[in-house]
Image (cartoon, rainbow, N blue to C red):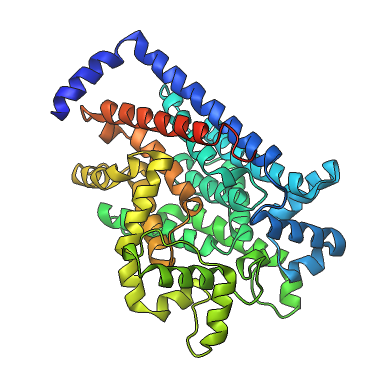
Amino acid sequence: MINLFSTIHNKIASRQGYDRFIDLSFLLSIFYVFVMFFDSVILSQKNFGDENAFTKDLIYYLDNGYYDTVIHGISIPFTLISVFFYNLINDHSIALRLTGTIFTILPLLYILLRTKLLNRNYRIILFHLFLLIGTSGGQFYGTNDTIFFTGFLIFLLESTVVRDESKLHILLLFLSSIIFILSRPHFIIYSFVMVAGFVFFKLIQKDFRFIKSHKRVVYTFIVGLIVAIILNMPRLMNGQYSISHSNKIYTSYKAEDVNWTEWHYYSQMVGNKKRFGLFAPMVKWEEVRNYKLSNPDSKLPNSYTGYLIHDFYHIIHRIPISLVEVVAVSVRYVGIFLFILPFVLYKKIRTKSFDYNLLFSLIILFGILTWVIIWPHTVETRWLYPFYLLLIFVMVEDSTIKKLDYHGLLVTFNIVLMDIITIWALWKWEIFRSI
């Protein structure tokens, strides 16, 4: 049956009408990402959500300078760039959003100008990328998610796809590593994912020269870490032996006595009583506070590591449920691509196709599994954004998958599905959801 549909698709795809369909889908994605940009940057309420915490960081820096603010805790690269825009436009929120927007566009420009990942199928790839960016609307908000993901993606792609001997290569590795390390403490999680994916990739190849084959990358990252530590000298001199990151990571802008991990864990604990815990709704902050006051001996985990050692049964119960949640929600962002990932891994390993797409597939898998394991509640899709971006390139351009007769059918089906979802979203929001 699949072969029959694939044969029909190949006949359709060879006609001029198919190109027009791709062009229309591509134009729809451009329109959609523009709408989401306008909605998020221009129409959305200022200091909305997490942006409020970074607005406070920016104001604190403007009032107190670099030394005191690093001690206080900021995302250094994000705040410094936002200060530049604030000096031009004198608006905290817009300055933060311009920074977020620039670092949303920058990875696309990098991929276009620096790598060879875009070829004659560029419309299909950009179609999926624009929809991913637009659907991950927080990319344009005034938070440091985008600058963090930019550092991660450029460092990863320079380490794998590019890997030339130029000075530009060293410079990009160095700058991206500094941005990556200084933007969010999550760099530890994503560094683990990169290393785990790379080590597993080498084990599959039976190549045990882990460090020798990537000495330049390892050394550059170490230098980047040293520079990051130097930029944090105010904290070290103040007896704070940690890298400066935004206080939003540790406390909520709503409650100083309840942090994000406690809020999510308690919400999931309550939600486990219904629907096997699937998509448990978030409880009110006051409810978490009251629980802590009423149960002083029953502590809630307040960090990733605290969660991992708090309740082993909760973790075992959450993993399969969380995987179902991630796969189900991924349809909104990348269509059916995540469903196909296990088959892609199997096919590439079986055919010994040891290329960077296999490495990307492993990093995607380990990245999703890591978040599923360490987070007590429904995994927020924004944390999976760089993995979904890589997934798009693997599914559309991988040479092993493209050899399959039904590859074109799967991609076309995904485009149609994403078209329907996008048109439905625009209709539901009446184009702009912030109005």
Depth check: give the residue in front, 419 or 207: 419
Q: In the picture, which quadrant includes the N terminus?
A: top left
Depth check: give the residue in front, 277 or 115: 277
- 279 over 21 or under it: above or below: below
- Which residue is farthest top? 16
Residue 65 relative to residue 418: left or right? right
Q: In the picture, which quadrant includes the C terminus?
A: top right
Residue 305 relative to residue 182: left or right? left
Q: Residue 273 in the image: x percent, y percent?
A: 35, 70
- Residue located at (46% from left, 18% from top): 24
Depth check: give the residue in front, 274 or 81: 274
- Residue located at (27% from left, 52% from top): 205
- Which residue is farthest bottom? 297
- Which residue is farthest left? 1
Residue 82 relative to residue 267: left or right? right
- 254 over 292 or under it: above or below: above
Quarter of image, res 139: top right
Q: Is residue 211 visible?
A: no
- Residue located at (26% from left, 41% from top): 353
Q: Residue 2 in the image: x percent, y percent?
A: 16, 29
Q: Can residue 337 be seen in this view?
A: yes
Q: Residue 143 in the image: x percent, y percent?
A: 64, 52
Q: Residue 151 in the image: x percent, y percent?
A: 57, 50
